[in-house]
Image: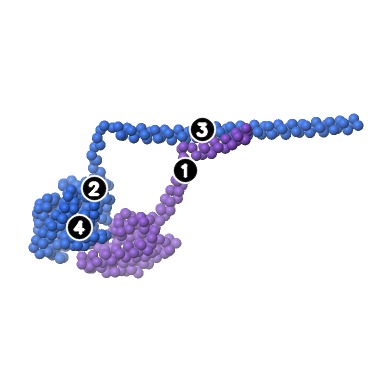
Amino acid sequence: MAVDRKRIEDIKRRSEERERKAKRRIFMLRRVLLALAALAIIAAAVFAVRGCVGSIRKKHAENAALKAAESTAVPTPAPSPSYNEKGINETFFSNSAFFGNSFIEGMKVYELVPSDTDYISKVGFTVSQASTEAADGGTVPAIEEFSSGRQYDKIFMMFGENEIGWIGDAFFEQYEAMINKIKEMQPDAKIYLMSITPISKTASDRADDGLTLSKIKAYNSGIKTVAANTNSTYVDLFTVIAGPDGYLPENAATDGVHFGEDYYIKCLKYMQEQI
Amino acid sequence: MKKLLMLTAGLMCILALTACGGSTAGDTSGDTAQTEASQTGETENMAVKTAAILNETAHFAEDLTEMSSDAVMRRYGLDGETVVNAAGYAGTPAVVDEIAVFEAKDVDKVIEAANARIESQKTNYSSYAPDQVPKLDDAVIMRLGNSDCVAVCVSEDTSETISNILSAVADDAE
């Protein structure tokens, strides 16, 4: 009997010990979890505060910069000229239109002038076609593009080469009439009449459609008069392009007439510096 | 009390992830931009590569000048609504020779624009330089295989020669 009681007490004691140990384990586990939770709260708080403080500092800096810019009493100076990688003064040619024949069409490929430039042109264009036919990519007669709403600062025109075989003064009279119409639609635009550029000796000797160097020189003289009559500026590109013999160099154009990028750059640089 | 503490810890963790810095959202958009950029890069290469192959392989009346994507699209009256990007080469107005390759969003519209340009050039050059018109009659406008690339080529070569070049490009791409 005494043995049984002792055994029972042993079992009871062991059971109580196991229970105590189990309770201690649970107790410790809970403490560890609480500690982890506290660490998580602290870490989360730190990241949240750092993110918010950084954002607030950035906003304060932006506001300060904005206030500094607004509070300046110094008037904004006029923009200084901006040149592209080809040396073309984009400020000079900004808000411009180029209007005319294949000379203008050829310019498009090289993108030498600002991207907001309008090209109103077509190969073979004449002053009479410009009043009745659309330019390349256009839907209305080319001249009507000047009443589209956009007001240009400068309009550069190139006509005459395709009219070289016209009789008498028909070209100059129609050119003058067209310019006067455009001036009504674009009262504030400066108008520049570009001379016909020289052709090679081979092309001049070929005399396609009557196109010779002497005829070009005669027409340029007439275009100069049209410029004077319409209060426009004559741009002497002939002299800029011609070689020492007065012709376009033979290697400048495969057909002796339509030259490439280098010559366009010469023309544009002359215009931005001399007119 | 302990449950409340655990819940609070969880909420704080969530708040930390959406803190003012917003770096997680920035990272996600950066990944998206990078994926789009790599996809655009692949399609740009096809248009640029095809145009370059034509320029090097086909025969033209004069050396052609490489044009920007914008210049090519303007030439054909196309924009970002119909074209992802474009590549091309062109000569002076003395010749009608040119190359244009488009990564199209709308293949039919691009082909329509290409046909319109060829017809317009025929009208212009029929009186300006009639000797150029036969090249326009033999112009090639071709979709490259199953891709969204449309190539246009006006050259001194026959349409068969140009088509063979473009077919080879399409086969390589696939």
- Between the C-alphas of marks 3 and 1, the distance is 19 Å
- Asked if marks 2 and 4 fall on the same chain, the answer is yes
Q: Amino acid at mark 1?
A: Ala
Which label was assigned to residue A143?
A: 4
From the image, state whether disc 4 or disc 3 is nearer to you.
4
Look at mark 1 in the image and give the residue it sits on. B25
From the image, state whether disc 4 or disc 1 is nearer to you.
4
Look at mark 2 in the image and give the residue it sits on. A94
Write down the chain letter for disc 2: A
- Between the C-alphas of marks 2 and 4, the distance is 20 Å
Look at mark 3 in the image and give the residue it sits on. A46
**Circles 2 and 1: CB distance less than 8 Å?**
no
What residue appears at the point 18 percent right and 51 percent down from the top-left corner?
A: A186
Q: Amino acid at mark 4?
A: Ile
What residue appears at the point 24 percent right and 47 percent down from the top-left corner?
A: A94
From the viewer's perspective, is A108 left or right of A8? left
- Between the C-alphas of marks 4 and 1, the distance is 52 Å
